[in-house]
Image: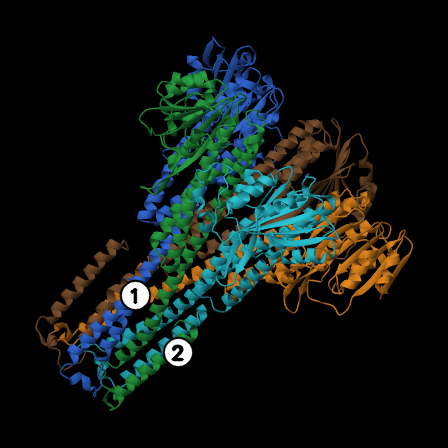
Chain colours: A green, B cyan, C orange, D brown, E blue
């Protein structure tokens, strides 16, 4: 959790609107690419200099500029200048600790959203911030590093079938957001499987290890929740936006996006409930086991401590202990022992301890 | 819980509006039927080809088309084309992980709702998604498999008494929704009985097994809640809808439907409270039992360990232990033992341990 | 709790608006009576046939028709027909599992409310549903059985003093609702006394029995809450109603009614908090007692097990144990024992265990 | 808690607007006094007969009538008649179980508020209901008994400095309410000190006694909360009231009053959180102590029970036990014992039990 | 916690608007300074007499008056008089127990906010109240003591680059608030690190000490929450304020400020969740350890108590115990012992206790 605030300290004292990258540099150099398309045209290429992006600002074709890597503030500053992006937006783009949000700057909309990766090696969730600038004929996306969940969107644009190239940049922005939200379902499915497996193991053999797994899943849920709850406002904000950048045919899709975010939130909340339930179950199981252990101890001690006393009595060295000299004392001793044990066992059974 | 997200992964990467079935195929082939009626006419028949459904789109008679089985996307696509249903609606119909919702598409209303089955064999709740399309003179219902809770509605339409055939498709949609919600009461009643029986058994003899039953009921409650809460918005949305598809005489019935969903939600919340209460009761009972066990152990150990020591003392082999040779040592020993035991028993009684 | 859903199953499959009694028949036959009054006139009589009720529908005098027993649907149907009551209202009247609510049907208002009885014999809360129809010059009340909390209202009407007979049917309805809500205070007072007595006993001597009493009070609270929360909406709905059936002079009294329901809700919530607090206290007391038991055990075992070992050592039969033959061994043995015991007791005292 | 409902039963069955005192009579006879002032005049005197109050109803001077003692309903009735107070208001004044509220009756505003006393002797919070009637040129305050927190207000009126006498009855009402709310801070401060001292003692030596203190503070918090939460609505209702009785210059003071009530609520909520935290801390401390006790027991038992067995073995009387006759058996026995003990102690240390 | 209400008692009884310092005096004497600037001019100096502040009230240059130390009410009174500040505002400035808030007095806005310090020596959070008066051409800031988080703001004004000197007093106020909120991130980062380190230590070795650290962090969270939640209203109030003192270009920055406060609140809530999770983890760890301790005890006692009994039996002194005289009794005894121990160990292993 604390990692969300690491390195943030450098920021304190900077003037508002200062563009300084606040995060770990995850990529060696900034990587820029563009997809430029109309209904019947399509162009896709890498861009090496930031000036190469400038022509794509103009209509009529729709352009999707994608920037991977946020540490080179020079690039961002020049991009911001040409596309007339407010300094505070640039500041938010490089400060990767934003909350998901939607802001309407008149000429463009600014959207922040969190993309989740499930790191297979560290078996940990990692979060990457995606910023989108939706302009009249372009979408600019900013990512922390190379590698994203947008490959399917690119494919749809390339083959040019369906609705993808017929519609404008608002639909492109929708597709990108939808890809991110769809990816949440993959994460949720994986977590759901982990919860199910935890539950099964809890029912069979509760070990201390499970508790730590429940705890770390709960932590991930807190992380997930912070990314997912504000999304609802983003999606409903887009749907109801009065900006003319969002056109009517796209709104029905945005309503669908909204439904999906609600589904994600629902699932996250259910998982939280499930995890609390599992923790309760774990604690009860521990109590139960302790109870069982205590019963065993009590039965053994209750059976043998009195017998031990009895044996001790007849090991005493008093001169005058007549029963020591009787013929049938020793067999009688065993009869008494067996009777006592039987009685106590019956008593325990009646108590329900056996 | 995780089952809600299984198979969802295939969806990621598909274009929005792609109609691909996301669920387990529960029926061998798609099964279509129609009930077509006016105030004095009634026709009921099976339809084998999707084209057979097309004529029922037209007024003046009201038609109820029922489709069982969602895996054949070809059928849905052609139906959607003829009835001019938005691709996103078709996508939602086949994606059976929707949240209950109501959407107004102008020419028709789209309603998603969850039908619950109590599987007697697996003693588990199962969920089936029902989608309704309410058009000007028709209702289309989509189910995952054959078998539903609508038989009573069909019967009412067949015998033609009462309000059923006099009113339009909005009343038909109401009757279907009402049948689903009525069925919730059956489920709730059954769960209520389970809770009551659990409670009785808890008071008599709390076993570890009960804990798992409480846990699994709590899980069912999470499932139920997710299906039931959004229903409230659906019902109130229909009642207050400004669509001219919902006519005034039907609204009073929709208010009734709304009342019923509130009752269901109330019951679900009460059950959740009850189950939390039962879990607390279980844990307290375990604590109580542990306490009782500990008391038994403590009493036995406290009684006999000192006596054992005493017996041990007189079993020592020191040459000079004068009391070993006295005449009344041994009887005195027993007097001391009895006195000690009596004293301790009195002490325990005063402490309230006996 | 489950009892709220018992017998509900029969309903499933019935057409909406079907009037079938859903409850236990609590009275042998339907019992009807009327109070008919103006400012200076008053008439009170029993009615044997349902037709006897019909003339009281007309102004100018205000009539209060009271029906005890809901199982005879024939009576209700004819009453409903004459007074032009909507079938759904009749259905709700006989379905005694309604949530408290207020519905405006234009010509009349329909109010459902729950009357509580504290059954002295079973020491259990029981719930009875009261339905009121408030028309332009009449109020009809429906009860499940004979016996209610309205005797004071009747008395006020009979003696004709005060405001009661000067005002119209809306004031009559208010008086009836007020009587029901006033009765809640009696119930709350009784529960409050039970909680106080529980608390006192908990502080003195926590027994397992108390836990079950706390649990059953919590259950009653769940029941009470379900009846009381929706009442708030009923009261505020009446106060702010735009219906001309509720006249201005009555509204100030309805505001008072609203205040009372808020007070009841407040008390119910406080009691819930109190009961949670008591349960926590109980559990802590159990923990404390367990701790005390464990301490006793530990002290006894820690004192005597080492001593027992020492005695055992000198009971060994080795040929060569020189200390067995010394003159002062045995007194020295006792000196060692006493020293050990004293030391350990001091240690326990420093630990705060004694 | 229950005391809030004691004696309430008498009320049930009374006609609405019946003025019957519902509370304990806390004062021998009704005590009336008046402060009558203008900007340059001031009069203060006791009133023995209720008729003495009547002239103070008239402008232009502002009058503050204070009534201590509510049991004499005759006095109240005549006062109510002359000042034209609605019977329901009179009923609420004498029914001292009201929730704090503000009601606008056109000619006057009616405010109910709770004054808290910390009873030094019983070390318990007690609650007194204060009712205020704010008219065009007068304020009437009703208290259950003599003794209040208004002395500073009287002093301010007497010496005539500052704003107090320049402004009208609305400012007077504000001053009274402000005095009551200010007094809450005294109570909160005292409770805060108790919580702090509890916390310190919990950290040093948790005893059973502390649990009961936490419990009783939690109870007081429930009481306090019920009095404080509705106050917020009273304060904001006064500030935003459209009544011409509240003049513009006073509103800025009422906003200040509102801020204070929010501060009080904040503190109450924080204290609740603190108390929950303390209870958790207490329970954890108990668990910790139990753990420590158990460890001591386990260490002692684990050390000495095996040794006891060993000693027992060599105390057996078998004829053929060769080691009994060896020369070095006994010293060897001690070597074994010391080795075993050392080994186990090392094991315990590694486990972290020592 | 209680410290928030200490010394507050003196206030009770004072007339509203009385300016009396309510806090600890943290500075020897009041310290005043001014920064006066236009786009191209800049002046910075200390002021020794309060009259020295008066000229800075006038336009056109923007002036920032900073007052450190609030105990000299004379200074405040004269300042208030010249700048026409409402007495209630002066009262709030010196009463350092305010809740963060924004008040619009027409000619000026009044903002209260809490500045946090992390005291390195006492390792404790301390809170300082900052009051801002935003007038048409000036900002006055009041602090309890010398030393603040505004150095970076001063530096920006001094070097005159960027937006700082081009914009008016509203932007200055924004910069001050932003500096305070930015400082929260430093605090949060530090707490985040503490939580992370606590978590690590909990997983390795849970000690009693950790519980107290969790508890004290929870306390700090309660404190932090009280300061942070109302901030949201302050920030959104400023952004949406209709006052002409806040100009349009500044509003976009205020929205940014609002975003930051939401981020802070989010983090505080996440930390609370984390701390609850840690506490649960701690308690479960304690339960687990207790379980382990109990298992060790039970295994040892169950193994050796029966063996001890057996050894005791053959230490009895009955005359007629034939087995004592058999040749192979003693070796057989050991065979039995080893068999028993092996059997029990196998049993424990099957139970999962080893």
The N terminus of chain C - image quarter? bottom right
User: Where is residue D261 drawn, in percent x and y?
Assistant: 60, 38
Residue A95 appears left or right of E168? left
Q: What's the chain of the residue with tag 2?
A: A
Q: What's the chain of the residue with tag 1?
A: E
Which residue is located at x 66 percent, y 39 percent? D234
Residue D263 appears left or right of B157? left
Picture quarter containing residue E353? bottom left
Q: Nearer the viewer, residue B78 or E36?
A: B78
Residue holding disc 1: E350
Q: Nearer the viewer, residue A243 or C289?
A: A243
Q: Nearer the viewer, residue A8 or C261?
A: A8
Q: Could you tell me if residue B152 is visible in this image?
A: yes
Residue holding disc 2: A346
Which residue is located at x 46 percent, y 18 percent? A57
C-alpha separation, residue under disc 2 versus residue under disc 1: 25 Å
Outermost residue on the top side: it is E40
For disc 1, the neighbor class at 10 Å (few under 14, some 14 to 19, many from 20) is: few
Residue B168 appears left or right of E263? right
Check residue E148 in the rendering and tell me which mark sits there, or answer none: none
The relative height of residue E345 versus residue B250 in the rendered view (above or below) is below
The relative height of residue C106 versus residue C351 in the rendered view (above or below) is above
Disc 1 is placed on an element classified as helix
The relative height of residue B85 versus residue A29 in the rendered view (above or below) is below
The relative height of residue C145 versus residue E252 in the rendered view (above or below) is below
User: Where is residue D227 drawn, in percent x and y?
Assistant: 62, 45
Q: Could you tell me if residue C262 is visible in this image?
A: no
Which residue is located at x 33 percent, y 60 percent? D294
Outermost residue on the left side: it is D327
Please state which of the two labelled residues, at mark 2 or mark 1, is closer to the viewer.
Answer: 1
User: Where is residue C185 drawn, in percent x and y?
Assistant: 68, 56
For disc 2, the neighbor class at 10 Å (few under 14, some 14 to 19, many from 20) is: few
């Amino acid at each position: 959790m604390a990692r969300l605030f690491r390195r943030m300290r450098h920021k304190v004292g900077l003037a508002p609107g200062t563009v300084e990258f606040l995060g770990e540099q995850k990529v060696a150099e900034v990587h820029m690419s563009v997809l430029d398309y109309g209904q019947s045209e399509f162009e896709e290429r890498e861009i090496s200099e930031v000036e190469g992006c400038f022509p794509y600002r103009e209509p009529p074709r729709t352009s999707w500029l994608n920037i991977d890597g946020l540490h080179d503030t020079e690039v961002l500053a020049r991009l911001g200048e040409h596309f007339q992006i407010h300094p505070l937006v640039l500041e938010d783009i490089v400060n990767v600790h934003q909350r998901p949000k939607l802001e309407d700057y008149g000429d463009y909309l600014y959207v922040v959203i969190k993309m989740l990766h499930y790191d297979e090696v560290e078996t940990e969730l990692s979060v990457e911030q995606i910023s989108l600038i939706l302009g009249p004929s372009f979408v600019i996306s900013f990512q922390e590093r190379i590698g994203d969940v947008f490959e399917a969107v690119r494919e749809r644009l390339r083959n040019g079938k369906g609705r993808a190239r017929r519609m404008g940049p608002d639909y492109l922005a929708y597709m990108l957001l939808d890809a991110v939200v769809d990816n949440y379902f993959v994460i949720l499915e994986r977590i759901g499987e982990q919860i199910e497996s935890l539950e099964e193991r809890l029912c069979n053999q509760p070990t201390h290890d499970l508790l730590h797994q429940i705890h770390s899943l709960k932590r991930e849920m807190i992380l997930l929740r912070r990314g997912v709850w504000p999304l609802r406002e983003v999606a409903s904000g887009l749907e109801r936006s009065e900006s003319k950048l969002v056109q009517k045919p796209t709104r029905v899709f945005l309503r669908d996006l909204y439904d999906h975010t609600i589904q994600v939130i629902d699932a996250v909340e259910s998982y939280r409930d499930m995890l609390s339930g599992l923790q309760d179950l774990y604690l009860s199981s521990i109590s139960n086991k302790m109870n069982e252990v205590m019963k065993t101890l009590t039965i053994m001690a209750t059976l043998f401590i009195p017998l031990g006393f009895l044996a001790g009595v007849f090991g005493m060295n008093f001169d005058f202990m007549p029963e020591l000299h009787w013929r049938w004392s020793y067999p009688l001793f065993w009869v008494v022992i067996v009777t006592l044990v039987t009685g106590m066992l019956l008593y325990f059974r009646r108590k329900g301890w056996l």
